[in-house]
Image (cartoon, rainbow, N blue to C red):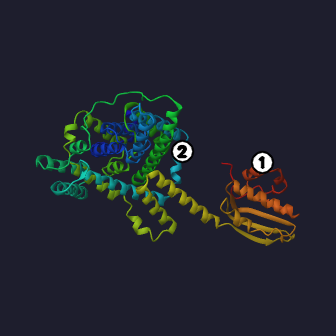
Amino acid sequence: MIELIKKEVQNPKDDILSGITVALALVPEAVAFAFVAGIDPLVGLYGAFMMGIVTAIFGGRPGMISGATGALAVVMVGMLKEAGEKFPDTDPLQFLFATLLIMGVIQILAGVLKLGKFVRLIPHPVMMGFVNGLAIVIGMSQIGMFKSGGDYLSGTPLVMMIVGVLLTMGIMYGLPKLTKKVPAGLIAILVVSGIVIFGQIETETVGSFVRSNGGDGIKGSLPVFAVPTIPISWEAFSFMFPYALILAGIGLIESLMTLQLIDELTETKGSGNRECMAQGGANIINGFFGGMGGCAMIGQSMINVNSGGKGRLSGIVAALGLLIFILFLSEYIEMIPIAALVGVMFMVVIGTFAWSSFRILSKIPLSDAIVIILVSSLTVIFDLAIAVMAGVVVSALVFSWENAKRIRARKSMQEDGSKLYEIYGPLFFGSIQAFNEKFDVTNDPKKVIVDFLESKVSDHSGIEALSNLVEKYEAAGKEVHLKHLSTDCKKILLKSSEKFKEVIITDVDDPRYFVLAED
């Protein structure tokens, strides 16, 4: 393990300082998401620690931070409520821990089956919509920090909160212009905290925030191993499995998209499949040690990268720092003003949002602009998983429609009286109708040749279209031949029907490219 960490470390000082900054920012986030899920703040803090340490050491993306997240908390609150109604004799929290075990297994299987690579299929407009929507969600989540006891701040406390936020943002904006040797976020938190503590200024702190929301503070002991105590029955499993599937899907989508974003920012490449397995392992550990589970956190990951933390050490320091806060430094961490942490997160929002999307909306295809707006909106209204899936589906439909219009056929009469159809463009489910319209079975001569040198048969629908075309010509008493089909294409056609033996021209041994591959 030590060798693994050494291999990934490029700048230990930056990683350590950045990790401390992230640890401080993790505290209110983990507590807030625990409240969203309706569970004890320590469960959220334990979850953030265990997710952070496991993914930092074994994950596929050095520098990426994982912990308790709002996207999962929203699902968890519904699950806990339903568990309390269906199984009144069992603590609903035990069902959460058991569900995390199933969730972790699903995520590990996704890594073993190498499903992480499918993140490459997410189009760039979806990525832009994802970061925009998530930036808005992160910003909106900070509004809740302006509450005390369930009510929004007003008067002097509100003014002091706003001043603290603006001061933090000002330091983070100006300090990098003077020096980049220390993380601006950490310095901003220390400066604002010093002013509040030594100036004895009355304002919301981490401690007052936790207590005003029903918590007893962030002090705790080490997580303890325990097997979730739930009824062993098909009813219990059938209740948990759909939630585990949803949580696993949301967690992997958010983690893999965050991984891709960090890849672009750092100009390095992470391993999606390895990250899937690390996320799964971390969630299983959470299930056995009483954490709320989680996934990658784009906000904290952005803080880390922008503060210079690009190695595994930064994530390890963040996780261990969080544990140290819980065990030994809780009274000092509780003195940190919420304004400082909110200011850091607002700067993350500004840095995360793809402001260039406003500039390019009028310059890109209308469909791409619609996808950016759609994904951004759905991320805010529903959740990340629905937004990304909707964006991918819309992009895929647009792609299919555009390619469906590209099928062409050049027609010419040959010296022997036969007619040649030279097909251009992909033949797949979307272009079948246009393909069929190219042929004039009734008026064509007795012999017809269809050349696929410049075409690509992409799916089973294309195979069926060829089969139906051959049947139409044979029913009309005419001879049809298919030319320039690859070996794989011929094999599949012959497997579907023996009649293709007489139809396919086999003396063409050197097509320019494969027309159809079995895979």
Q: Position of residue 71 (x, y in %)?
A: 40, 48
Q: Residue furthest left?
A: 199
Q: Is residue 324 depicted above or below 464 in this figure?
A: above
Q: Position of residue 254 (x, y in %)?
A: 44, 49
In-image side of 434 versus 233 (left or right): right
Quadrant for the N terminus in the image: top left
Amino acid on which disc 1 is placed: Lys
Amino acid on which disc 2 is placed: Leu
- Give the structural element (helix, strand or loop) at label 1: helix
Residue 321, visible in the rendered structure? yes
Quick one: 84 or 518, which is closer to the camera?
84
In-image side of 105 versus 333 (left or right): right
In-image side of 402 versus 450 (left or right): left
**Residue 115 disc label:** 2
Total labels drawn: 2
Q: Is residue 437 depicted above or below 272 in this figure?
A: below
Task: Write down the residue under mark 1.
Answer: 495
Residue 181, visible in the rendered structure? no
